[in-house]
Image (cartoon, coloured by chain):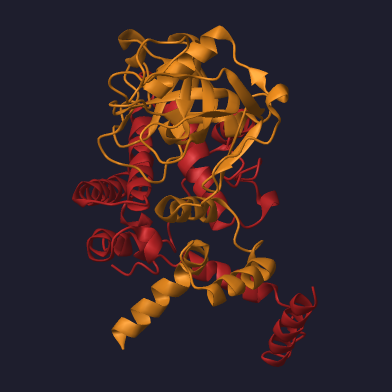
Amino acid sequence: MEHTLAKAFCRTGNLKTLLMQGNMPDFVKEFQVLFSAYFGSAFSGSQHSDITMLSYMSHGNGDAPAMMEKPDQLAVLSTETYQDLISCLNEELSPPRYCSQPSPHPDMWIVDPRVQDKQIVTMNGVTFACVSKHVGNSRILFTMVGDNLQHAGEIQRIFIHQRRAIGLNTEFVTEIFFVIRQFQALDDMQAAYDPYRRFSGLPCRLFSRQFMGDRVIRAQNIVSHFASCPYQRPELSGQFLVVLSLNRVSVLGVVLTAG
Amino acid sequence: MDLSTAWADAPITVVLDHSVLSEVWADMANTSLPSWISRAPHNLGSRGHGKLKADQWRTACQVNLVITLCRLWGHPGASSREQALLHNYLSLVIAVHWATTRSTSEQHIELVEQHLVYYVQSTLELFGSRALVFNNHASFHIPECLRAFGPAHGWWAFPFERYNGILQRFNTNSRVGMCTNVQIGTKTTNSSNR
């Protein structure tokens, strides 16, 4: 009896998440429409959003980005962003497979500089926006390949790009990229005055409000949004920002950026 | 000690006075949050905003108060009481943060355990035994539940709070049982017609 009670408790408690799984039988999917119509608004808020995100992360939402505009309507990347995109694409490839100019190597592909701009994208149930659209939705923590530090940045631009696939059966692959303006981490001198850093288990740090250069990142580099608030104290000269991670799938050992 | 009467003759201790709350409100107005997170009322701590939802409590305690209290009480010039209050509060925040993550491990659980113990000990030192409530005892069972059942979102009771909210919003017209059945029946019929 205890087992039945515990099972019913957990299933009921996770009903919404269960219904969002992509691998449910058809009759359950029909029930999901009815459920969302009547109880959708009752299941909103932070708890729901991050559980929904988890559900998508476990089972995938199946929505691949698509280029909607005609080729002549696409925007052309600036030279710097184009080079950043190529670096981003080559990041996990050894040797590099993407380039900007024709190469004597037969397995090098030229990257198309044309992209489709987006102001807002929703991925895994979470909305990301350019800073010009929504500041809160644009501020994200991200990691780079082979790095266990989380960096804070602001989304300047979101674009969809199509390229030739490597090692896949499909001919082209379409992917969302983000142009991020990174907040500068504190130096050691400034970090000594960071009151948040003293609490090692607290996912909160001060960052300088000065920006480092722009960089292009992929969707999988994004860790989470963060809450931010301007910070001022007499002992710390300059402009600073409190960055509080809103990551709910926290992994110990991955730290909010170094000083 | 009888915890149910411990507070009865206790003097009132004000921790978040008007000057602190003013700073909290100012920071709240300047805080950027993503659209998926519920915001706490702008006049947090006033009677005017009524009862807060669990989600609003979470944002207020895990985000807004952390940002402001650390700034006010975390600098080197803060008094020893302010620093002790900050350590006390943040130990609870850290315990709650790591107890409610969507993944867990023995390291997570140990962190939760350490901070819960520190929180209760420092609460005793700061406010005396009258400050202890039943939930402080119950919280010490969280680590064993995490070990037994995994991440908290799978077994916590928040969804049932929501179900209670849904049920409370039904207009029963004082005829409990009948009206709810009629309403659900009507809603289902309406949906079939759409």
From what the image shows, is residue A25 above or below residue B176? above
Quadrant location of residue B6? bottom left
The residue located at (45%, 10%) in the rendering is A102
Quadrant location of residue A76? top right
The residue located at (56%, 77%) in the rendering is A27
Towards the viewer: B133 or A123: A123
| Residue A144 on image: x %, y % | 36, 25
Q: From the image, which quarter does the C terminus of chain B lie in?
A: bottom right
From what the image shows, is residue A139 above or below residue A3? above
| Residue B32 on image: x %, y % | 59, 31
- Compared across the picture, whether B110 is left or right of A226 comes to left
Towards the viewer: B84 or A171: A171
The residue located at (53%, 14%) in the rendering is A81
The colour of chain B is red
The chain shown in orange is which?
A
Examine the rendering and report whether any part of residue B69 can be seen: no
| Residue A202 on image: x %, y % | 35, 36
From what the image shows, is residue B47 above or below residue A146? below
Count of marks overlaid on the render? 0
- Compared across the picture, whether A205 is left or right of B52 comes to left
From what the image shows, is residue A152 above or below residue A203? above
Q: From the image, which quarter does the N terminus of chain B lie in?
A: bottom left
| Residue A70 on image: x %, y % | 71, 30
Examine the rendering and report whether any part of residue A207 can be seen: yes
Towards the viewer: A90 or A3: A90
